[in-house]
Amino acid sequence: MTVLEELKERLAELHDLERVAWLLAWDEETKMPSGGAEARAEARATMRKILHERCTDPELGRLLEKASPLEQELEPDSDDASLIRVARRDFEKAVRVPAALQAEMTRSGSRGYRAWLAARERDDYGVLLPHLERSLELRLRYIDCFGAPDDPYDVLLDDFEPGMKTAEVEAIFAELKPAQLGMVAAVAGAGAADSECLTGPFPVDGQRRFSLWALQRLGFEPTAWRLDDTVHPFESSPAIADIRLTTNLREENLGGVMACFHEFGHGLYDRQIDPALTRTPLADGVSAALHESQSRLWENMVCRSLACWRCFYPRLQADLPEQLGSVPLETFHRALNQVQPSLIRVEADEVTYNLHIVLRFELERDVLTGRLALRDLPEAFDAKLEEYLGLRPPDLKHGVLQDVHWSDAAFGYFPTYALGNVIGAQIWERAVAELGDLDEQFERGEFGVLRDWLRERVHRHGRKFTPRETLERAVGRPIDAAPYLVYLQRKLGELYGVGAAS
Ligand code: ZN
């Protein structure tokens, strides 16, 4: 066996084990009876241990070293050179963190999760605080594993957005924040949209029939995709031809239908990775923000557009005749795009959403640098929410404890949601510039031209290039907030007749 063959075989096994771990997680969130929880926690911890051992195996390091001369000979863009480069980067990062610290973080995380559930239940932040303090201490030790970074937040951000620096996030947010605050104020002056048609009860069976029908128009193939129920929607792909979407259809509103469209965008990214990359570390999305850019593009740019609903709406009316049979398309479309400050991040509209993220990013930074003590976090959260959106949470569930991310001090993830919106708009702008107006196709229920363009420009590369390189290959430019703000302003002009402040 050549060095490259040996390396590939090891990496293929590692890939297989990782996907088995994903399947265990998918099953836990969708199918497992609650009685299986304890045994599943053990099984997942064992898998994590095995994965960590394999990722940091000195033999893997030796193989990567031996493959180094070969990497120099190969074309840098080739699959093999990319494989060696990315596998080395993964290895060098993994070996910096001692197994004991990794295990301690995992343990503290699951304790924190249970405490988070209890704290929400009792509306008592004190239940979570000691676990949060412990998790933060471990995060700081984790950061120490990476020497002395310019900014400690860089280390945490890098886990989700490889290569990106905190200063770049700050620069993007410095553009988004004042512009989006201005838009919220402008819309408040224009009066709220009539969104009564989005208040249920909507029979869940009808929602499910419609969702599956619409997903199949978008590109969901029954032989390669699934849709299942869960509490917090997510997407998981055990293989390129095995895409699992999950959603949470509830009678009260159509949020679960929109979640299907969001998760479809994630699924399509994974589905359209070059099959030649299968069973390698390259067969995955390149970063959290790039992944989120795809879900937001499909959810918002495509599936909130009037053109798309010209195709979808008659079918939705047929599946929910009592609720929507007599509601005109334009009323429904306007309601679906209403801008209204709200407490819950995951339910926020496109204009207020990023403000929820900016707020969390600012607080995470303050906690990490010691400017804000964890015990003062709830109050700081409420104060910022009031400042940006004019609302005060009635309890912790609607405030600082609404998201699971902070239950184990997993800082660094939140910014990728807003960066996903920004990148999604850049990619959408470029697609429309090259493909022309897509409305006519959407009205006919045809989405293949956009799917193919995204495969060619973004999806097929998987992790071959860095997130920055991947974006530049797609749109020819680095990350830029302007297209997102232009997109929002145009939309507000159309829906609310406001020019919206810049
Ligand atoms: Zn997402």
Image (cartoon, rainbow, N blue to C red):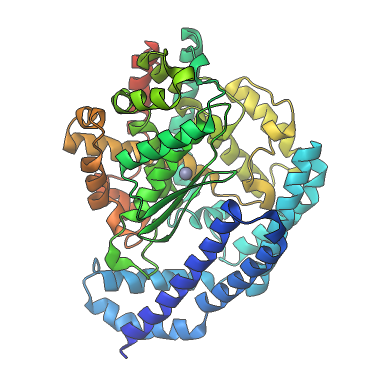
Q: In the rendered image of this protein, does residue 185 appear above or below residue 4?
A: above
State the image quarter where residue 201 is shown: top right
325 displayed left or right of 122: left
Inspect this view and state whether residue 227 appears.
Answer: yes
Q: Quadrant of the C terminus?
A: top left
Inspect this view and state whether residue 480 appears.
Answer: no
Front-most of 153 and 401?
401
Residue drawn at x 36%, y 79% is: 8
State the image quarter where residue 331 is shown: top left
Q: In the rendered image of this protein, does residue 451 appear above or below residue 174?
A: below
Residue drawn at x 39%, y 20% is: 333
* Horizontal and vertical percent position of residue 383: 68, 27
Front-most of 194 and 152?
194
Q: In the rendered image of this protein, does residue 68 appear above or below residue 241?
A: below
Of all residues, the one furthest to the bottom in this rendering is: 1
Front-most of 139 and 192?
192
377 displayed left or right of 345: right
Q: In the rendered image of this protein, does residue 183 appear above or below residue 33?
A: above
Residue drawn at x 42%, y 13% is: 327
* Horizontal and vertical percent position of residue 118: 78, 45
* Horizontal and vertical percent position of residue 181: 50, 22
Q: In which quarter of the image is the N terminus?
A: bottom left
